[in-house]
Image (spheres, helix red, strand yellow):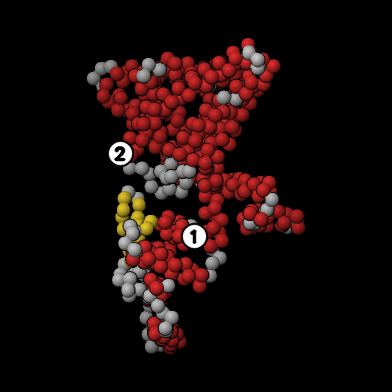
């Protein structure tokens, strides 16, 4: 490997992650932080098989698109928004007018069929199940990106997804209508008022109004659908980048009619179908890219910390373990409510993942006990009398947790080593510095 290639490889593999950004100029620090996020995103995008997930979501979307729209139209009709919503869809997807018209037609037919006859209840139940299923598939994919092993409970899924289906069309219509109204009012004001010289510039800016709407949509998706807490600024970060890419790709697609001539010559009047599939696949690709960006933005500090923590010595890990025990004991001694992983991590200044790992060790060592304090929430308190928990006892219990194998008489050296180590442990117990943890 040539020297320039080696230098570049070393930079992306090691140096980029060990540089202290606080010591760099602001512009360079910002650039390096964004580069970290992009590299982390690219790696996770591949490791999480996002292209494959995008294909799967395209397939699920295609199968469920008519039932889902039938349900959305049925809900929007209750608000008197059905016609307006259909018109808005045609305006938002001008490059897929033919496909949208087909979907609207089939959705209306399916909705009417589900409302008539003896199968009314079954038809509506099937529509509802189909819509919930596609949202469930989206959640599972975003949970994979966020490394969440457990989905919502069925009741939570039903209530959350139903809220999305009821409020989604209404919010979409209201936000679009407000944007159109503001744009028309501003355009009239600048055209006839004192801001007339700025009219072309303002009109150009008004053409950018779809961007904030798509950013809002993506932000809500990244915050609500994953079964974890996503910070607003991280969701917004991924939404702005992904939403902007989405709008630019759509503009390029419309402006240059990418693939239209080629597919027209092959499929004729059916050319709209493969073009729509390509657009759907690309849309999911961009949505998942945005989700990966949100995850990277929120978890880069944790990744850097754990990368550094991997090099911690056993001695330093013992210091951290004793510090955790001290924090829990002092909190218990004050009569305060038991601490959560996050509170413990904050006080000891380590990551939540590392706190969880250390707490597991302390629980197995019978030093700390875990309490259930709510849904998916755990707190921790001492497992025994705090007036008997010494430094030596904590370290001794940790060392002896797990299986200890005995050696027969033929294994003289291991037996001797074990005897010496046990002697060390007894000597530490008698050492005057072996004080109670609470007295540190």
Quarter of the image where one finds residue 71: top left
Q: Nearer the viewer, residue 77 or 237?
A: 237
Q: Is residue 248 above or below residue 229?
A: above
Q: Residue at x 37, y 27 (%)?
A: 166
Disc 2 packing (10 Å; few <14; some 14–19; many ≥20): few
Secondary-structure class at tag 1? loop
Secondary-structure class at tag 2? helix
Q: Which residue is mark 1?
A: 349
Query: Which label belongs to residue 153?
Result: none
Measured as percent of width and height from the top left, residue 428 is found at 42, 82
Residue located farthest toward the front when viewing the structure as drawn: 194
Q: Is residue 398 above or below residue 20?
A: below
Query: Is residue 275 rendered to the left or right of residue 80?
Result: right
Query: Is residue 260 rendered to the left or right of residue 1?
Result: left
Q: Residue at x 71, y 57 (%)?
A: 6
Q: Is residue 80 above or below residue 359?
A: above
Q: Residue at x 56, y 32 (%)?
A: 243
The quadrant of the image that shows the C terminus is bottom left
Residue located farthest toward the right when viewing the structure as drawn: 3
Measured as percent of width and height from the top left, residue 42 is found at 59, 45
Measured as percent of width and height from the top left, residue 387 is found at 32, 74
Q: Which residue is mark 2?
A: 155
Measured as percent of width and height from the top left, residue 268 is found at 57, 17
The quadrant of the image that shows the N terminus is bottom right
Q: Are marks 1 and 2 in contact (CB under 8 Å)?
A: no
Which numbered disc, 1 or 2, marks the residue that appears first in the sequence?
2
Q: Nearer the viewer, residue 84 or 41?
A: 84
């Amino acid at each position: 490997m040539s020297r320039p290639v080696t230098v570049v490889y070393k930079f992306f593999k090691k140096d980029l992650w060990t540089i202290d950004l606080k010591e760099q100029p602001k512009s360079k620090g910002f650039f390096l932080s964004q580069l970290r996020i992009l590299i982390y995103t690219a790696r996770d995008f591949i490791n999480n098989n996002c292209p494959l997930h995008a294909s799967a979501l395209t397939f699920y979307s295609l199968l469920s698109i008519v039932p889902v729209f039938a349900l959305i139209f049925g809900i929007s009709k209750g608000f008197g928004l059905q016609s307006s919503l259909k018109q808005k869809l045609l305006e938002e997807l001008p490059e897929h007018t033919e496909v949208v018209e087909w979907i609207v037609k089939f959705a209306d037919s399916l909705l009417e069929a589900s409302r008539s006859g003896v199968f009314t209840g079954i038809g509506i139940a099937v529509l509802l199940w189909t819509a919930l299923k596609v949202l469930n598939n989206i959640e599972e994919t975003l949970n994979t990106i966020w490394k969440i092993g457990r989905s919502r409970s069925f009741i939570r899924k039903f209530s959350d997804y139903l809220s999305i289906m009821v409020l989604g069309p209404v919010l979409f219509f209201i936000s679009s209508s407000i944007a159109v109204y503001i744009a028309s009012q501003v355009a009239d004001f600048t055209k006839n008022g004192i801001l007339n010289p700025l009219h072309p510039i303002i009109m150009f800016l008004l053409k950018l109004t779809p961007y904030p709407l798509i950013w809002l949509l993506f932000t809500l998706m990244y915050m609500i659908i994953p079964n974890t807490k996503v910070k607003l600024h991280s969701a917004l970060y991924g939404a702005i980048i992904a939403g902007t890419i989405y709008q630019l790709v759509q503009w390029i697609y419309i402006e240059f009619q990418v693939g239209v001539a080629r597919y027209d010559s092959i499929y004729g009047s059916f050319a709209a179908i493969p073009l729509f599939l390509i657009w759907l696949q690309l849309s999911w690709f961009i949505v998942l890219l945005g989700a990966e960006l949100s995850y990277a933005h929120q978890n880069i500090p944790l990744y850097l910390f754990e990368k550094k923590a991997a090099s911690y010595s056993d001695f330093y890990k013992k210091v951290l373990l004793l510090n955790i025990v001290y924090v829990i004991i002092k909190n218990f001694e004050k009569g305060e409510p038991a601490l959560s992983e996050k509170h413990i991590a904050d006080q000891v200044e380590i990551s939540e993942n590392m706190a969880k790992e250390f707490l597991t060790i302390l629980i197995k060592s019978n030093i700390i006990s875990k309490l259930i304090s709510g849904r998916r929430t755990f707190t921790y308190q001492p497992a025994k009398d705090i007036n008997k928990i010494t430094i030596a006892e904590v370290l001794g219990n940790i060392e002896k947790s797990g299986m200890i194998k005995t050696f027969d008489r033929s294994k003289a050296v291991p037996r001797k080593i074990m005897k010496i180590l046990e002697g060390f442990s007894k000597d530490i117990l008698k050492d005057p510095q072996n004080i109670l943890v609470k007295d540190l």
